[in-house]
């Protein structure tokens, strides 16, 4: 039973345009959501997070939106840059800081 | 500084070997985690240590044995592994586990790529 899903395994976007990554979850007990970026052969790098009591959090080029009623969050990257090409994982946090990760979305930013 | 270091970077071992993975952080974090990541899959939690005590074991086989000698160091002892245990092993740490806020954010090390022959 996948509690966190990223339904798009890959995304291709032109440099300078917006990248939108989506994530759906089923467990209403999740209280915090995080996005991580991962390059091959490296560990995940924390990007941005949002509390379940918020609907938007912004940090530079990265904005995360949370729609709690739909159990859906999205990550917007504007403008996209070639260095953003990586795999992006959505993660949801349960009590005791247990993270459940989505399957990941591979982003390719074309110059 | 959000650096978590892991050694070795790569490890190849036979099924009868005993080896250890090491993870270190000097951020004063009091929670540390071991994850396993298979190719094209998300990370899966194995163990959680909180204040140097084992808090969570996600039903991991006993051939994996974690150890937390002090608040900065986390080891994973490996013995009699199977080829299907080949994976990227990730360590993470967080300031806390129960603050409910950004202090619980987990920061990951670069991982150890393990191959079991």
Image: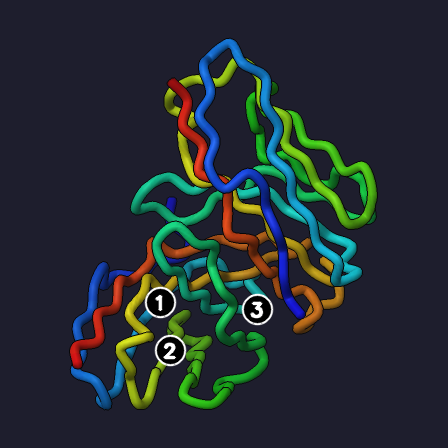
Task: Please identify the quadrant where the N terminus of chain B is shown.
Answer: bottom right
Label 2 marks a residue whose chain is: A
Q: Are marks 3 and 1 in contact (CB under 8 Å)?
A: no
Tag 2 and tag 3 share a subunit: yes
Q: Nearer the viewer, residue A54 or B62?
A: B62
Q: Which residue is drawn at 48% across and 87% down?
A: A56
Q: Which residue is drawn at 67% across and 43% down?
A: B48
Q: Which residue is drawn at 48% across and 31% down?
A: B11
Mark closer to the observer (2, 3): 2
Q: Nearer the viewer, residue A32 or B72?
A: B72
User: Callout 2: helix, strand or loop?
Assistant: strand
Mark positioned earlier in the residue sequence (2 or 3): 3
> Position of B57 compared to B43: left or right?
right
User: Residue A23 got which mark?
Assistant: 1
Label 3 marks a residue whose chain is: A
In x, y percent, where is residue B73? 74, 44
Instruction: Give the class, few, some or many, for how many residues have Cα within 10 Å of label 1's Cα (few <14, many ≥20).
Output: many
The residue tagged 3 is A32
In x, y percent, where is residue B52? 81, 43
Between marks 3 and 1, how big is the CA–CA gap? 13 Å
Q: Which of B84 and B24 is in front in this view?
A: B24
The residue tagged 2 is A75
């Amino acid at each position: 039973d996948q509690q966190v899903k990223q339904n798009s395994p890959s995304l291709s976007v032109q440099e300078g345009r917006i990248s939108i990554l989506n994530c759906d979850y089923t467990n209403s007990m999740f209280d915090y959501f995080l996005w991580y970026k991962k390059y091959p052969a490296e560990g995940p790098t924390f990007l941005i997070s949002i509390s379940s009591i918020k609907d938007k959090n912004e940090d530079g080029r990265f904005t995360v939106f949370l729609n709690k009623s739909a159990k859906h969050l999205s990550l917007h990257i504007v403008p996209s840059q070639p260095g953003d090409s990586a795999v992006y994982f959505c993660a949801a946090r349960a009590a005791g800081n247990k993270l459940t990760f989505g399957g990941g979305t591979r982003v390719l930013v074309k110059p | 500084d959000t650096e978590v270091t892991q050694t070795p970077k790569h490890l190849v071992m036979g099924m009868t070997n005993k080896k250890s993975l090491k993870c270190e952080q000097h951020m004063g974090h009091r929670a540390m985690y071991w994850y396993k990541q298979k190719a094209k899959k998300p990370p899966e939690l194995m163990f959680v240590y909180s204040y140097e005590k084992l808090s969570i074991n996600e039903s991991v086989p006993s051939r994996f044995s974690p150890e937390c000698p002090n608040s900065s160091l986390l080891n994973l002892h490996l013995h009699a592994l199977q080829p299907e245990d080949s994976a990227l092993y990730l360590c993470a740490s967080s300031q806390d586990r129960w603050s409910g806020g950004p202090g619980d954010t987990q920061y990951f090390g670069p991982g150890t790529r393990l191959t079991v022959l």
